[in-house]
Every structure is written in C-alpha cells, then in structure tokens.
Amino acid sequence: MDVRKALFLATVFSILTFSGITKAGTILPGDIFIAVASPGEVYRITGGGDFSTATPFATGLSDIYGLAFSPGGQLFASCIGSGTVFDITSGGDFSVAPPYAWGLSNTRGIVVTSAGKMLVAELSTGRVMDVTGGGDMSTAPAFADGLSGPRGLFETSAGRILVGEEYANEVTDITSGGSFAGAPAFAIGVGAPYGLAESPSGRIYVSEIFEGDVTDITGGGDFSAATPFADGLSYPDEIIFDNTGRFFAVQEYSGSVTDISAGGNFSGSVPFATGLYTYPQQMAVAPVPEPATLSLLVIGGVGLLRRRRS
C-alpha cells in the first residue's frame, strides 16, 4: 500500500471513529476478520490482543470454515455443517437467517475473484463450485472436479486460481475450470496444503498444516525437500497478508494468530491475537478503496461531524 493510500486510510479511520458510526456491524477498509469453527462465530481482530471475552462480529454460523471479501466489500462465509454460504456483511446473529447459497457438501475454502466469481471448495466431493449467483447448488455443475481433497482457494494478482489438495499434498492451478483428475500440479511435495497467500512483491506461499510450516512455492515444482519460510507453528490452518504487508498465520490448535512477516522459527513466539477458541480457520481482510474513493469517504465523514456538532 503506497503512502497516499495509507494517509487516506488513517484519515478515514479517525473521522469514522470520532463521528460515532463505527458500530459493531461497520466494516472499515483494512479490517481483519477470522472465522472460529466450533462456536460458529466471526471476530474482528484488526488491532490484535486477547479475544477470549470479545463480542463476535457474527454468530450463529454452523461450523464455519471459509471467509472471503468480494472486491466491493461484501463479506461471505462458508459453513461445513450446513453446506451453506452466508453474506455476513451486516454482522449479527445468523442462526435463523437465510443463506446466500445452499445445497453444498463439506464446504471449505471460499474465494471471490477480482472479476466477482465466487468459488467454494467441497473437500469430500473433490469439487470446486461456482456459487456466484447464489441459490440451491445441489444439482449445479462443478466449476472444477477430479481434485483430491480441495481445501484452500486463492486468486493471485495475475488472476490464477490456485487450490490446495490436502490428500494429494499438491497445489493445482484451476483457472481454466474443468476436470483435473490426473492433471499436473503447480506445486507438489507440500504436506497437507491448507492456506495460500501472495505477498505484495508477488511471492506465493502455502501453509503445510501437519508440518507446522509455511513454504514459498512461487516458481512451482517439487517442494518435498524445501526449506520453509516459517516453521514452529501449531497447525497453521490459514495464512494471509493484510493491507499493510504484514504476514499472518492462524495457529488452529493454540487458538491464535501470529505475525510471521520476519520468517524463521515461531515456536514460543508471542502471538498477534489470542483467545480464538475453538479452531480458528480462515481469515479475510477488508479491501482498501483507491484514493479517489477514500476521498469521498472522508468528505462524507466530515459532513457527519458537522451535523453532529450543529
């Protein structure tokens, strides 16, 4: 993120805070969210700290796993237990809310591409489903199939759609859609790949959950003997870069999130966020608008301040 955008973002945060409109359901640019599976909740963890007694952003989501923002700022969640996808942008209790999409099976990772296509991985069926239009997906054709335990989904800055195949220990490029049974993988020799992320400089990383590692797989190939970028992590389910370039890893078994930007060994390190029990899963970062859009937010915020003072 360049200096202009950072300055605009800081201004927006200040104005929204002082104008009193940063209520529970408000999503600010750059906000960081995490899904916690067992209570079926989503937490805003932007500032880090202990969240053991924090109020969730969203509740009532059955065994939630995936989180993803659309380019326009809508926040979607995929739920394993109910085979559903919810639009949770408003925050609140979703225990009786209608889902955005349903009729899915063992849903895991979710991604909304830069073109607005929403894809969800089905672990047990070996499929990735296109749920962009919402509705009943029980008889819908797959966007991609023939995969071996698809879990994490990610779109690179170049528009490539990658999926981690847990049972094959591979990462596959599924951008073209279709059947990938027997297809060559982008990266092999990665132990149970769950999370995928891309750095601001274009490096691509994968979390190897059983090894407790995060590995740079930028060039593709065989990584069975590669030296990890980060290790000493406790079941790293998800990795993500925020809008300032910090690199985070979710440690599922310790209920925490760790800043791994420096690389190296993180056993015994102090986490960025704690108290996320039980089983924190995917994270999502709210998109930051371009400076022109941020200017409009600033103008609107100033107007709110003036009305409150008059």
Image (cartoon, helix red, strand yellow):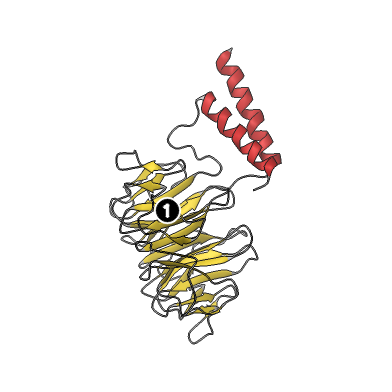
Residue drawn 56% across and 66% down?
A: 204
**What residue type is disc 1 on?**
Thr
Mark 1 Cα within 10 Å, few/some/many (few <14, many 20+)?
many
Q: Nearer the viewer, residue 283 or 178?
A: 283
In the rendered structure, the answer to whether residue 37 lies left or right of residue 248 reads left
Image quadrant holding the C terminus, namely top right
- Callout count: 1
Q: Which of 49 and 23 is in front in this view?
A: 49
Residue on which disc 1 sits: 258
- Residue 182 x, y percent position in the rendering: 49, 87
Q: Is residue 66 visible?
A: no
Q: In which quarter of the image is residue 103?
A: bottom left
- Residue 219 x, y percent position in the rendering: 60, 75
Q: Can residue 240 be seen in this view?
A: yes
- Residue 129 x, y percent position in the rendering: 47, 68
Quick check: 103 above or below 36? below
In the rendered structure, the answer to whether residue 9 lies left or right of residue 102 reads right
- Residue 6 x, y percent position in the rendering: 63, 41
Quick check: 22 above or below 190? above
Residue drawn 31% across and 55% down?
A: 254
Quick check: 78 above or below 227? above
